[in-house]
Image: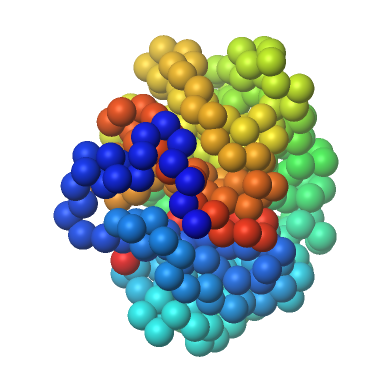
Amino acid sequence: MIHPVALSFVAFLACTTLAHAERIYVSDEEANVIHVIDSETLAVTARVPVGMRPRGLQLSADGRTLFVAASNDNRIEVVDLQRQRVIGTIPSGPDPETFALHPDGRRLVVANEDDALVSIVDLRARRVLRETPVGAEPEGTAVSPDGRWAASTSETSNTVHFIDPNTGGNPYTVIVDTRPRVVRFSPDGSRLWVTAEVRGTVMTIDVATREITHRIDIAAALPEEAIVQPVGIAITRNGGRVFIGLGRASHVAEIDPSTMQIVRFFRVGFRAWNIALSPDERRLYTANGLSGDVSVIDLERNEVVATISTGGKPWDVVIGP
């Protein structure tokens, strides 16, 4: 069921011309499925059964395969998107929550929350190459565009770790605000964006110096919300727009990276955890874990235009063919 928010669904379709319809893939940690949504009709077209408590998602380099972190099954599952079914599994280390695909398309960097480790996984050999000790409860993962660095947040120790994915070395640790969650490198690789769920901030770290260069207090800018939880991050390809999902605050914040100022807020569903841009960057999708839906933001109109009901507890979202 689709509920119009800022515009009617008919008006949304009339003003949104798509070169071709992509699919929106949403992990549901309660229903143990991947919801498949047609981006043109915004209808749920399939639900793909996967392992227990699916969370982080990544598309393969060729866009034909979806990797799914089945957290409670201690593995990464491989979903064939054409056949829409699980075709294999990859060992990941215990309790994978998030992971990042290396630019070479052959390795995954996986956060193992229970064991305070980051695992480097060979996709072809389907084995763990090496494990790197990090702070307690590793959560967010990212790999720089040039493949030189992997980054991982540790929730309990309030740290970000810079890891060499080739050797597994962990030469740099940066102390950040309370309960860091998601990390994303800027498109040019010069900045690392970090969200701090409990402190209600987003920070940038200079990758060359490993120093915090900016801190934005989003909680202070949204005083009407009792709980502001910056989590998911999405950045446009040119680096000109940055979006932050705010969890239970039921908003997405947009930040101008040239000024490091908050530009606007979008009101979305309850517990907007992870977010994703469409390939043409005209839309932003949010996985809303406690309202059981996905919000659709039109980034040309800067309005929330639709809400797609999925049920369950949506956690992550990616867009693919």
Q: Residue at x 82, y 41 (%)?
A: 156
Left/right placement of residue 183 relative to residue 242 reads right
Q: In the rendering, at what x and y percent does residue 275 appear? A: 50, 44
Task: Mark yes or no: residue 128 visible.
Answer: no
Q: Residue at x 40, y 38 (%)?
A: 305
Q: Is residue 298 above or below residue 316?
A: above
Image quarter where the C terminus lies is: bottom left
The percent position of residue 2, horizontal first and vertical second, equals 46, 52
> Taking 202 as reference, is 36 left or right?
left
Instruction: Look at 75% across and 27% down and name the residue there.
Output: 227
Query: Quick check: 239 above or below 43?
Result: above
- Camera-side residue of 111 and 165: 111
- In the image, residue 75 sits, relative to residue 257, either above or below, namely below
Q: Is residue 171 above or below residue 199?
A: below
Question: Which residue is located at x 63 percent, y 52 percent?
Answer: 292
Determine if residue 180 is in view.
yes
Q: How is the image coloured?
A: rainbow
Q: How many numbered dots are placed on residues in this image? A: 0
Residue 143 placement (x, y as % from top left): 49, 50
Where residue 34 appears, as percent x and y from the top left, is: 55, 68
